[in-house]
Image: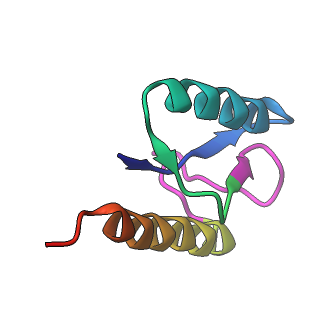
């Protein structure tokens, strides 16, 4: 299974969770997208989320889009050829 990890935290918490989730994923036989990686410091200005928890930062939205496009391409490469 293809997978990507995205985190939104403060300080180094998100980066550390990335590393730990990759370790767990190896045991579960997941195949992770290696790049782009996306760590979002949710507490650093400017505001990244609105009061409902929606991502509003345009740069972060673009980075998220790149992660998802990379995951889509990686998933297609992992599918068996008929």
Residue 22 locus on image (x, y percent) = 61, 35
Residue at the image point whose x is 59% and y is 52% from the top: 49
Q: Is residue 51 magenta?
A: yes
Part of the protein shown in magenta:
39-56
Q: Nearer the viewer, residue 71 or 49?
A: 71
* Figure quadrant of residue 57: bottom right
Residue 66 horizontal/vertical position (percent): 55, 73
Rendered view: 5 above or below 24: below
Q: Is residue 71 left or right of residue 59?
A: left
Left or right of residue 33: residue 42? right
**Is 70 displayed left or right of 39 in the figure?**
left
Q: Residue at x 56, y 64 (%)?
A: 56
**2 drawn magenta:** no
- Seen from the viewer's position, the closer of residues 12 and 45 is 12
Question: Residue 24 location, x and y as percent?
Answer: 55, 24
Disc count in the image?
0
């Amino acid at each position: 299974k293809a997978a990507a990890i995205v985190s939104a935290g403060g300080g180094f918490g998100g980066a550390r969770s990335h590393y730990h989730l990759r370790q767990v994923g190896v045991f579960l036989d997941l195949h992770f997208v290696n790049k782009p990686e996306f760590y979002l410091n949710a507490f650093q200005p400017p505001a990244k989320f609105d009061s409902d928890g929606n991502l509003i930062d345009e740069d972060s939205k673009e980075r998220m889009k790149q992660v998802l496009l990379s995951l889509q391409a990686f998933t297609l490469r992992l599918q068996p050829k008929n």
